[in-house]
């Protein structure tokens, strides 16, 4: 007589805080490899004034293409520009409440080593019934950046803080040459805000998200590379 099958416990359902950058993409990769939670959505704050990912300034259409390429639904959190901390926390609080009501018990973050940011997230989620997860926390960033590149993660720098990194890095690919070119003192993952990225391919993607570099502009003390869907400039220039 065959032995009865043991019923596996259901995995915890989690959202992933998705900045559109390489660290959140790598967090997705590690969560899927670990298999302990099921990532069911990408939680992203979106500047509703400009229809772009907050801080990274990635166009909403590219964010949506990312979500399709990794096979997960977007949970956009609209915020105004400028946005007070009170408005931000109210918007995120509503998203957390919705997640809890839908049976989601965790939100994962791509934070690497900044204790104050981790503490803030833990304090905001305390008592909500939704636990914070930090799948990439504590991985040495030099080793992490090199592993990302070796594993085939593709990304471009969308935002540079010119006080920490030359503006010429905006729009560059995140690759071995970029890592070699970073000035001394710049974290290779940009964890101190030196730069932000847009992930467009890698082991966490079902297919790549082709992009091309658009205009580079300076705004609010930062340098932004406006990434465009591949071929967008040619389509705009072609006659009707």
Image (tube, helix red, strand yellow):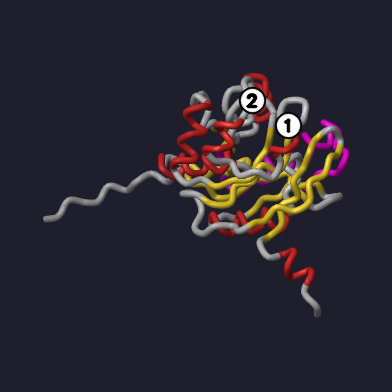
Q: Residue furthest left?
A: 1
Q: Earlier in the sequence, mark 1 or mark 2?
A: 1
Task: Identify the mark at residue 25; answer none if there is no mark.
Answer: none
Q: Is residue 166 magenta?
A: no
Viewer-side residue, 17 vs 234: 234
Tag 1, which secondary structure?
loop
Q: Is residue 176 visible?
A: yes
Quadrant in the picture for residue 158: top right
Q: Is residue 126 visible?
A: no
Q: Is residue 80 magenta?
A: yes
Name the quadrant of the C terminus: bottom right
Looking at the rendering, the stretch of residues picked out in magenta corresponds to 78-106
Viewer-side residue, 66 vs 201: 201
Q: Residue furthest bottom?
A: 240
Give the percent coordinates (x, y) of residue 38.
Answer: 48, 46
Q: From mark 1 to mark 2, how far is it between C-alphas?
A: 9 Å
Task: Identify the mark at residue 166; answer none if there is no mark.
Answer: 1
Tag 2, which secondary structure?
loop
Give the percent coordinates (x, y) of residue 105.
Answer: 56, 39
In the depicted structure, whether residue 239 falls above or below residue 55: below
Q: Are marks 1 and 2 in contact (CB under 8 Å)?
A: yes
Identify the residue at horizontal 87%, vertical 42% (top origin).
81
Identify the residue at horizontal 64%, vertical 53% (top origin).
74
In the depicted structure, whether residue 117 falls above or below residue 47: above
């Amino acid at each position: 007589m065959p032995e009865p099958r043991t019923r596996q416990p259901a995995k915890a359902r989690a959202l992933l805080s998705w900045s559109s950058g390489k660290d959140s993409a790598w967090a997705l990769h590690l969560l899927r490899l670990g298999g302990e939670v099921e990532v069911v959505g990408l939680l992203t704050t979106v500047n509703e004034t400009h229809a772009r990912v907050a801080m990274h300034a990635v166009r909403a259409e590219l964010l949506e293409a990312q979500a399709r390429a990794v096979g997960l639904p977007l949970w956009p959190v609209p915020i105004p520009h400028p946005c007070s901390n009170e408005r931000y926390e109210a918007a995120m609080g509503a998203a957390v409440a919705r997640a809890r009501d839908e049976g989601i018990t965790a939100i994962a973050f791509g934070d690497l080593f900044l204790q104050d940011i981790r503490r803030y997230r833990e304090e905001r989620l305390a008592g909500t019934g939704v636990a914070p997860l930090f799948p990439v926390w504590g991985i040495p960033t030099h080793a992490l950046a090199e592993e990302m590149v070796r594993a085939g993660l593709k990304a471009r720098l969308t935002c540079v803080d010119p006080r920490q990194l030359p503006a010429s890095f905006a729009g560059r690919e995140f690759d071995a040459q970029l890592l070699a070119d970073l000035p001394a003192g710049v974290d290779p993952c940009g964890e101190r805000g030196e730069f932000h990225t847009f992930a467009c391919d890698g082991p966490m993607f079902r297919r790549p998200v082709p992009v091309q570099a658009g205009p580079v502009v300076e705004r609010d003390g930062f340098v932004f590379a406006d990434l465009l869907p591949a071929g967008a400039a040619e389509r705009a220039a072609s006659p009707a």
